[in-house]
């Protein structure tokens, strides 16, 4: 830390800079200009001067030659869930800092649904003093709906307490439209606490009018965007800030380029990405690269990934631009379009070169309270997953859910299933599998049938957006029980079972979501477990990354209207419980 008075003295040439970057080409994201042959003077962790730095070079000043390189502000991810990487924040920084991400706005609803406000404490303690700056948006979705129980609860009182903490910069994505549009008490208390504190309130989804208007009237100001160009334009003209998940909306990006919009209300974010994909394709660097491929001018792409995101979160006085008084977070880039990062400076120090971390990020002891977040009163038995009916029945009608179904018509979901000895059977030949959600404290189990799954074995995990109870999909009840019990034994994680054997597992003992093991080990384990999952003959709807897909299958947020929870099938619009069979 340096005193602002000292920065002033450096800028005036009274004391020398610690570091001077010489001869680089500045990407000025404030004016969208390329400024050649410029110097940047750094004192401590902040920039003191941009221009001619010849007067601030002393005997101890370190000179960095940036000739032939572009100087770009460190990337600012405006909406992200570190937990989805499966890595603890410090381990996550080890893999994403070399990719150029120097600031993250962490939406905390994953860890808060596991741990409540203790999750905020963990995030802030874990990231204190980290080269990668982590700001936190407080979960608005703990629990995600009134019809779910999770490991935490955040209402108005809890929100008021958390919003006083340093680096808690707003309210995370508001997802429950039913409660938002019908004065749901808990959700509105959290939103009002954020507005009263003068903080940003984030949204979720891509609603169209009149829902879009109502959504913005609530105080929500933004959304991480994955829709089409028509939806984008409708939201932009209403003043919503769009955080483009570029990989998921490249056609929309191209459409916005063609429409010739002013990009001041647009940013770029990653949202969720597991460690094996971070290692393979990257983080914000990948999204910027994809935006440029979609036709966006490179200078605009860098604006979206830096100053625009910082301004949205009211952090432009700290990050998002290379300018006096701001943190010296600077990327040295050789090719703007390919986003080829040669060096990364964070807080005035070179932390990575050619994609490799060159500084030590020491690991802090992980507190015990985050490792003891799952408790099971007794072992799960195969019969716990049975759906029983009258023994004289031979056939029943059953709700058979499918991925990405956003309607409410049960007739569209109803199929006949065979009954044997009073137990309703799967029909793997028709792709109908059994799934269950087990509460992380063993309070309840919800069971239903799905047109998705595996023809062999079972997969259980404690990553279940957004409740983070335990999901399990299985070809037999015996395999389901074995997989779930092993998840609890690990204290959280991902487990694949076939027959009576555990084929693969990844321990995620931090809230049941993350691990503090080295990234290389975790990436290897995640790649292995995905390969094992593919050997169970997954339904095509699970895609090339079946494990990651399963983590999102049971979302209860907009636009879903019927979903399985640990309390059973729920109509999310009314709270009505729907029978699995009749």
Image (cartoon, grey):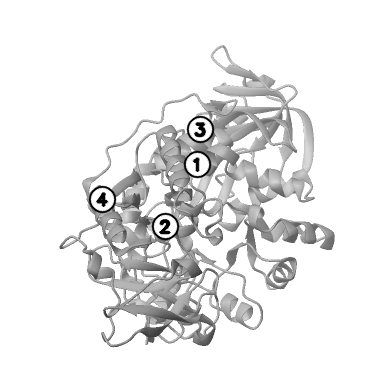
Dot 2, crowdedness within 10 Å: few (<14), some or many (≥20)?
many
- For image coordinates 45% across by 62% down, the residue present is 453
Image spot of residue 505 (x, y percent): 34, 45
Say which quarter of the image contains residue 59: top right
Instruction: Quote the CA–CA distance across marks 3 and 4.
Output: 39 Å
Q: Nearer the viewer, mark 2 or mark 3?
A: 2
Using the image, tell me which numbered label, if any, was put on residue 28: none
Question: Pointer 1: what residue?
Answer: 276
Mark 3 or mark 4: whose residue is earlier in sequence: 3
Is residue 499 shown to the viewer in this render?
Answer: yes
Mark 2 or mark 1: whose residue is earlier in sequence: 2
- In the image, farthest residue toward the top: 59
Mark 2 or mark 4: whose residue is earlier in sequence: 2
Using the image, tell me which numbered label, if any, was put on residue 491: 4
Q: Nearer the viewer, mark 2 or mark 4?
A: 4
Question: Pointer 2: what residue?
Answer: 108
């Amino acid at each position: 830390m340096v005193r602002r008075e000292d920065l002033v003295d450096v800028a005036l040439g009274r004391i020398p800079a610690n570091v001077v970057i010489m001869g680089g080409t500045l990407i000025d994201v404030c004016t969208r200009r390329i400024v050649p042959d410029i110097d940047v003077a750094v004192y401590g962790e902040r920039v003191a001067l941009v221009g001619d730095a010849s007067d601030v070079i002393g005997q101890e000043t370190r000179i960095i030659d940036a000739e032939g390189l572009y100087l770009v502000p460190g990337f600012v991810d405006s909406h992200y869930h570190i937990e989805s990487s499966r890595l603890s924040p410090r381990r996550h920084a080890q893999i994403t800092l070399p990719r150029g991400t120097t600031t993250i706005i962490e939406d905390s609803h994953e860890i808060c649904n596991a741990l409540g406000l203790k999750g905020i404490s963990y995030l802030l303690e874990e990231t204190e003093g980290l080269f990668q700056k982590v700001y936190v948006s407080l979960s608005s979705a703990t629990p995600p709906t009134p019809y779910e129980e999770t490991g935490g609860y955040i209402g108005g009182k809890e929100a008021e307490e958390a919003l006083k903490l340093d680096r808690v910069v707003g309210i995370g994505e508001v997802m429950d439209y039913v409660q938002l549009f019908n004065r749901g008490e808990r959700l509105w208390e959290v939103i009002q606490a954020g507005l009263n504190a003068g903080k940003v309130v984030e949204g979720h989804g891509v609603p169209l009018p009149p829902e879009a208007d109502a959504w913005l009237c609530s105080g929500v100001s933004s959304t991480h965007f994955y829709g089409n160009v028509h939806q984008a334009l409708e939201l932009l003209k209403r003043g919503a800030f769009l955080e483009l998940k570029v990989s998921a909306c490249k056609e929309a990006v191209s459409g916005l380029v063609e429409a010739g919009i002013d990009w001041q209300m647009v940013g770029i974010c990653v949202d969720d990405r597991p460690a094996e994909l971070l290692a393979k394709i990257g983080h914000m660097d990948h999204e910027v690269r994809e935006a440029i491929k979609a036709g966006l001018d490179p200078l605009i792409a860098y604006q979206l990934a830096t100053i625009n995101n910082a301004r949205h979160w009211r952090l432009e006085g700290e990050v998002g631009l290379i300018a006096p008084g701001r943190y010296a977070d600077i990327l040295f880039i050789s090719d703007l379009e390919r986003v080829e990062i040669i060096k990364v400076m964070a807080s005035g120090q070179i932390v990575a070169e050619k994609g490799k971390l060159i500084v030590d990020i020491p690991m802090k002891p992980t507190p015990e309270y985050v490792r003891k977040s799952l408790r099971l009163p007794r072992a799960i038995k195969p019969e716990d997953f049975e759906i029983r009916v009258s023994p004289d029945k031979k056939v029943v009608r059953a709700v058979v859910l499918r991925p990405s179904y956003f309607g409410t018509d049960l007739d569209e979901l109803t199929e006949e299933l065979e009954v044997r000895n009073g137990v309703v059977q799967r029909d793997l030949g028709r792709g109908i599998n059994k799934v269950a959600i087990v509460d992380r404290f063993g309070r309840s189990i919800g069971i239903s049938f799905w047109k998705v799954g595996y023809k062999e074995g079972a997969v259980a995990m404690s990553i279940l957006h957004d409740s983070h109870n335990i999901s399990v999909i299985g070809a037999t009840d015996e395999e389901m029980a074995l997989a779930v019990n092993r998840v609890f034994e690990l204290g959280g994680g991902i487990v694949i079972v076939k027959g009576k054997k555990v084929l693969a597992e990844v321990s995620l003992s931090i809230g049941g979501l993350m691990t503090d093991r080295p990234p290389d080990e975790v990436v290897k384990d995640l790649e292995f477990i995905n390969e094992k999952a593919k050997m169970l003959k997954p339904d095509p709807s699970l895609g090339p990354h079946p494990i990651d897909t399963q983590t999102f299958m049971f979302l209860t947020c907009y636009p879903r209207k019927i979903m399985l929870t640990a309390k059973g099938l729920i109509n999310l619009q009314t709270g009505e419980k729907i029978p699995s069979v009749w």
